[in-house]
Amino acid sequence: MNSAVITEATCVLVVDDDDDFRALACMALEVRGHQVEDASSAADALALLGERGEEFMLVITDHRMPEMTGRQLRDTLATSNPDLAVCVWSAFPDLGDDAVVKGMDSLERILDAVEGPTKR
């Protein structure tokens, strides 16, 4: 994820195959004033970004998803949308990738990184 803190409302794409967690993440972002779209798979995310990619400033994606992992999505987007910030999260702290935000509090830490810790 790029290091700039986002200070204005932003259109964020949340990608997660878990419906409940995806809804929770979307709600947390919307409450903070962000426009949010969601996708239940990396394939759906890529299709949405293919149609409306210029609208998004950030993609937050789960790592463990069927068919394409969050890291694979990040790598694909690094080529197709190099200016798009992508954050990969996982509830599994043993994932072993320093570029992945890990643990059950990962959403809170992502929001702090995106908005700055004083926004909330």
Image (cartoon, rainbow, N blue to C red):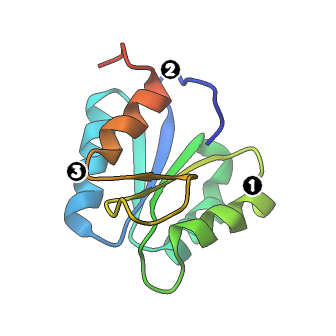
Residue 66 visible (yes or no):
yes
Residue 81 - label: 1
Question: Amino acid type of disc 2?
Answer: Glu
State the quadrant of the C terminus: top left
Residue 24 - label: 3
Horizontal placement of 19 versus 118: left or right? left
In percent of width and height, residue 119 lies at 36, 16
Question: 67 above or below 41?
Answer: below
Q: Nearer the viewer, residue 86 or 19?
A: 86
Question: 52 above or below 4?
Answer: below
Horizontal placement of 76 versus 49: left or right? right
Q: Nearer the viewer, residue 15 or 71?
A: 71
Q: Residue at x 34, y 64 (%)?
A: 92
Q: CA distance from mark 1 to mark 3?
A: 26 Å
Mark 2 sits on what residue?
Answer: 8
Horizontal placement of 83 versus 5: left or right? right
Q: Using the rendered view, name the quadrant where residue 1 is placed.
A: top right
SS at mark 1? loop
In percent of width and height, residue 11 lies at 50, 39
Question: Amino acid type of disc 3?
Answer: Leu
Q: CA distance from mark 3 to mark 2?
A: 21 Å
Q: Residue at x 65, y 53 (%)?
A: 53
Q: Nearer the viewer, residue 70 or 34?
A: 70
Q: Residue at x 69, y 65 (%)?
A: 75
The answer to which of marks 2 and 1 sits earlier in the sequence is 2
SS at mark 2? loop
Q: Nearer the viewer, residue 91 or 35?
A: 91
